[in-house]
Image (cartoon, rainbow, N blue to C red):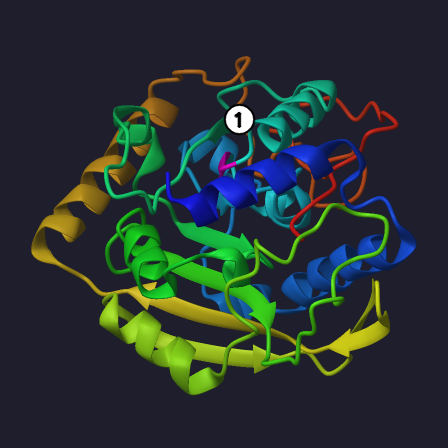
Amino acid sequence: MSAFSEANRKAFDELSATYNTKPWQLKLSAQVSEALEKRMDWMGVEWAKPDDRTSGRQVRLLDYACGTGSITKALGSSVTTIRGIDISENMVKVYNEAARSSGLTVEQANAVVGDLFATDVPNELQDDELYNFDIAVVGLGFHHFEDPALAVKRLAERLKAATGTLIIIDFLPFDRKVADQPKDMPDMSTTIKHNGFIREGMNKLFTDAGLGDFGFDILSEPTRMELQSGPVERTIFIARGRKAPTVWGKVSNWFYSMQDGIGGQLGVKRDDGKWTAGLDGQTQKGTAPWSAGLSGSTQKESRTWQGGL
C-alpha cells in the first residue's frame, strides 16, 4: 500500500464511527441519492424487476470505496446482489453491521477490505464474485484516488462485457486551501489528491479504459459543505461509461445468464429460499435502513445506511 493510500486508510478508519452524521453531510448524501434516482434510465442498466424472482436473473452492483453504504442505500432496491470494497477496515465493519441489522445475508450484500488499485492486487480480490458486475459506482471518492486512470481501468475490468456500466460521482474543479477541510473531523488534507474533474478529462479516462457511451451530467443545485474556513459550495457531476463488447465477454455474459435462468427454472432457491428482485423484494424505497434486501426484514435500527462521502 502506498503512503497516500495508507493516509486515506487511517483517516477513514478514524472517521467511521461518526461518518455522515452532520446535517450538511446527510443533505449531500440525500442529494446524490435523489440524483441517481432521477437518472435510472440514463445510467442504462437493466435493473431488477419483480419477475426476476422466478427467472433467477441477477443484477449485481459493485459499490467501490463504499464507506458505510450511501450508494448501496440509493440503488439497493434496484439490484439483487451488492459487493462493497473499501480501503478502511472500520468503514467495512460499519457497512456489514448495517447490512446484517437490515436482515440481509452475506450473499445478498457484503463488503470486504481491499484496494483494487494496488500494484499487486491480493488473491482475495480476485474471487469470481468480484467480477462480472452490471454496474460499478464510486460515490464521491474519486478525488481521493491517487491514479484516476488506473482506477478507471481496474474498475472497468470488473464489469460485464458490452453491458457493464461504470458510474463516477464527484466534484467539478474547485479551489482548495490548506484550511479547507470539514469541521470537527480529522485532518483530511493528505487524503485528497485532485481538486475536481472536468468533462474532457473524465471522457479520456473512460475511453482509455475501453468504456464507451460516455455521459456527463452536472447537478443543477450546488452542494454546501461546512469547512474549517467556512461554508463553501461545490458542484457535483455524474459520469457514465459502458464496457465495450468482446467475444469472450459475450460468451461469459451468456454463460452467467443461462446459469441464473436454469437455476430459476429448476426451482433452485438462493438467499433464504427467495428469488426476489431488489434487495428487499419491494419497489418502494426507504422501508428499511438500506432500502434493500433480497429477503431482508424491514426492521429499522438507529444506524442506517450512511456514507459515500
Query: Residue 10 or 216: which is nearer the viewer?
Result: 10
Q: Please state if 278 lies on the left or on the right of 265 as rendered.
A: right
* 256 relative to 263, above or below: below
- Which x, y percent locates residue 236? 65, 73
Residue 142 percent coordinates (x, y): 51, 60
Mark 1 burial class by Cα count in 10 Å: few <14, some 14-19, many 20+: many
Q: What kind of residue is marked 1?
A: Gln
Question: Residue 85 in magenta?
Answer: yes
Rendered image quadrant of residue 284: top right
Residue drawn at x 70%, y 62% as measured from the top left:
32
Q: How many marks?
A: 1
Instruction: Compare residues 136 and 139 and report the one nearer the observer.
Output: 139
Please check the rendered image and state whether residue 35 is part of the magenta-colored stretch, yes or no.
no
Q: Where, quadrant-wise, is the N terminus in this rendering? A: top left
Hey, which residue is sitting farthest left in the picture?
Answer: 247
Q: Farthest bottom residue? A: 200
In front: 42, or 283? 42
Residue at 43 percent of width and 45 percent of height: 3
Q: Main secondary structure of the magenta part?
A: strand
Tell me the magenta residue range: 82-87
Percent x, y of residue 101 = 74, 19
Determine the residue positioned at 52% across, 14% down.
273
Task: Using residue 287 as the reference point, say whether residue 146 is left or right of it.
Answer: left
Left or right of 97 on screen, residue 165? left
Decide if residue 62 is in sight here: no
Q: Secondary structure at mark 1?
A: loop
- Which residue position holds label 1? 108
Determine whether 171 is above or below 190 in the image.
below
In this rendering, does residue 305 appear at all?
Answer: yes
